[in-house]
Image: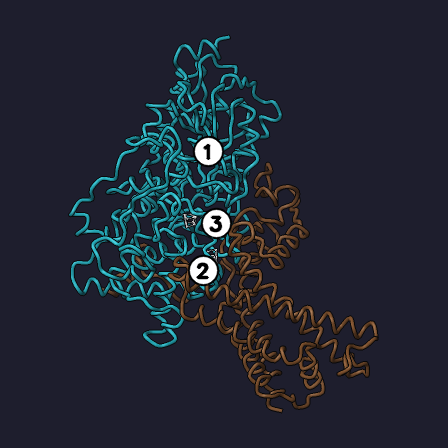
Chain colours: A brown, B cyan
Amino acid sequence: MLLTVFVYVSILAFIGLSLYKAYQYAKMPMHGRWELYPVPKEPGGKGHYGGSYYEDLEWWNKPREVSHAGEIIDMLKEMLFIKNLFINQRRQWWLSYALHLGIYLLGLWTVLLAVGAITELSGLTLSTPEGVSNNAWASLVYYATFISGGAGALLLGFGSLSLFLKRCFNNTFAKYTTPQEYFNLFFLFAVVASGMVVWSADPGFNYGREIMKALFTFSPIQADTALTIHILLLGAVMIYIPQTKMSHYVGKYFAFHKVLWDNEPNLRNSKMESIVKEAISYKPKASWSAPHINPAAQQEKK
Amino acid sequence: MGDIRPQDISKPSEQLVKVENLMPLPAPYDKPGMEPDFKEIKDSWKEDYCASLDGFVGNEALVRPKTKEEEEALVKGFLRGLEKLFSDETNRNYLQPFLLSFEYCAKCNTCSEACHVFKASGEQEIYRPIFRSEVLRKIAKKHFNGDSFWSKFTGGDIDINAETILRLGELAYRCNLCRRCAQTCPLGLDNGLLAREIRKLFSMELGIAPKPLHEKGTMLQLKTGSSTGITKDAFLDMIEFLEEDIYERTGKKYKIPVDKKGADILLTHNAGEYMAWPENPAAFVILFEEAGLDWTLSSDMIGYDNVNYGLFYDDAQTRKIGLAQLKAAKELGVRRIVVGECGHAHKAAMVSIDRAMVGEDNIPRESFLPLLADLIKKGVYKLDPSRNDFPVTMHDPCNVARMMGVIQPQRDIIKAVAPQFREMYPHGAKNFCCGGGSGFAIMKSFNFPEFRNKISSRMKFKQILEAFQGVMEEDIPKYVAAPCSNCKGAIRDILEYYQATAKFNVHYGGLVELVVNAMVQFDRPFLEFLDEEEFVAKHVKK
Ligand code: SF4
Ligand code: SF4
């Protein structure tokens, strides 16, 4: 039963800590503008060549146009394909994308395990020792789980190991890699490797559905040593990720949306104006000490 | 020291790196002897300043401590400032972008290829965009976590001593803050921002910033009204001279409107233009008067100088100057401010201080580029592009293009007046910095200009040479248009340093001069280098 509780805790920790991280960034004070073009939400061709509303004569008198579609498309390209890396550093992209695609596929696999578990709990068995069920839905779920789980594990395993090795043997990368960054990649690899050991004994991922069932019914997870180790590692990595820079799924959102693509002008009587009004009325409780900012601080030091 | 790592910055040595094997330049600069070598550095500089990074001294306010106590005070002050970068009381304006770039770097190295300083230097490790950022990370990790296991585990393996701080203080001035690297980062992070945060820490906590930016820059501007030191009276005299100059050049008398209350437009210039390139404000006078615009200049304190060097190193100074400029406009009662040919002034006035005021103080500000493009499109001027019938290329100022998204209007303008216009590659939002960005153009102490001419401006010079391939060695005038005062300064210096004007007839100047040069109403070229009779006979006096 302890394992069941642990899995619950790790899932909640992952979600909770990630949200907390997002909350911390979201509640930071309004920052000065620091946009960088191209800003994909600029409408028409501007989003592509890097133009903005400042190209229009008396821009403040024109209705503000924003292409949400442009922004979403660019965001999806970045999220799903890591576009910037693909364009600017193709070799690294192959390795990094393998790792990320592996994670996405394993996310899909987790959902499919849950779907499979619900299917089985409602009485339709996906597979028996004789083979996969003849029911179309059951076999669809079974094979989709098999493919996403298998491909995801292989890609994540390849990605994490190759990135780890590249960081060891490519001098430029090695110089900037901290022990923690090696550890992170190794940790991901260890989770996948332990999973592969379990998977090799049960290629259909039936064990995964059993775990899901245990979670849904809040009953003990039946696990041998290998599975126990895998579950412990997986849970630990989920608790660990949001506390490290591997939580860049949060950071990236803010870096693009709230910094590089935030070119909302402070127009009179706009919503932005009221945000600015509030921000500039704040009186900071501390200050810098250089003479041109705080002559008093200099006197104190003397 | 061969294979440098970020933590090596703290290890005492006479000079951390010696820059050699620079990026090769294209023809005709691919032959030996075409460019001057680096000069030997003076011993006295080494003793008094920080020459121990790369042998260049850019920051004359960064004085080497002479005693143990001074060293300790420097380190202590730096660390105090470091804490302030992480505080939402003291770094309110940049906390979020700063923490994102500080925390999330994946060390994927994608940004290195984008950096002109790194590439032009022959890939010197210390100029790699993440080198400086990583030094800052290491110092912060070490400072906040001490010598603990966690500190070392997360990269806090650096010694924080006076040498570390001095070298980092110089290294913050080896980045043009052009933010080209940030365009390529898969995580949207910004090493330019981190370089600026380091500059900020030095300036706002320790009062250390290069003199041309601080003491003779923002401080002088706040005191006298302009970083050039031009006072109101001197300004008014200069306007008179300018009227005479224009008359001499064009044969037409123009009255320059100054302090015209309630005018539609307050036009602002980088005051350096009046001294170094008066033909630029002169061209604006001609263009605005010929179009019949209701405009004025301001002679009010700070109203006649749109520079804001605070942008490069200090948030407090940026704000003070930006707000003072708006106040001058408000007092004149103008409807809008139009910013002339100065890139950083564009960004300072329109973007950087955009969230610093509300209501009546928030006077609309725009670039001269859409205004001029519109006037040309409407056919307000009679233009004969054949008067500019020589190869022309154009530089996009980073602050105008990459940081404000103004890219098309300057192309509409130049294509209307320059039949032999050719782009540099890359251009627009993906342009390379001129090498003078973030204050480098005006930092002239010690051997810093060598760093600029040979390293930070090298990529721009390469682009200029490539744009003129095929005609470079022909004895026809060639023109680099740079609609920005600082970029123009940097380009002037490279053309001089590499003797490109003397040897290959390459000239430079603003964009408006090119437009006035194409105006058929004048029977002399506006661009002085065209005064040669042959050109005039062929193109002007038809
Ligand atoms: S591209 Fe971004 S994540 Fe990669 S090394 Fe540069 S700053 Fe770091
Ligand atoms: S901001 Fe520009 S100069 Fe600075 S590191 Fe990035 S690319 Fe290089």
2 and 1 marks on the same chain: yes
Quick one: B301 or B370, which is closer to the camera?
B370
> Residue drawn 53% across and 47% down?
B362
2 and 3 marks on the same chain: yes
In the rendered structure, which amino acid carries the disc numbered 1? Answer: Pro
> Residue drawn 26% across and 37% down?
B37
Residue ID for mark 3 = B353
Pinpoint the chain carrying mark 3.
Answer: B
In the rendered structure, which amino acid carries the disc numbered 3? Answer: Ile
Give the quadrant of residue A291. Answer: bottom left
Q: Label 2 CB, ligand 1: below 8 Å?
A: yes
- Whether pointer 2 and pointer 3 mark residues with C-beta atoms closer than 8 Å, the reply is no
Estimate the spatial distance between the alpha carbons at disc 1 and disc 3, rounded to whole Å: 22 Å
Residue ID for mark 1 = B483
Q: How many marks?
A: 3
Numbered circle sitting on residue A267: none
Quick one: A161 or B455, which is closer to the camera?
A161
Residue ID for mark 2 = B107
Q: Give whichever of discs 2 and 1 has the lower sequence position.
A: 2
Q: Position of residue B303 (x, y in %)?
A: 42, 39
Pinpoint the chain carrying mark 1.
Answer: B
Give the quadrant of residue A149. Answer: bottom right
Quick one: A55 or A112, which is closer to the camera?
A112
**Secondary element at image label 2:** loop
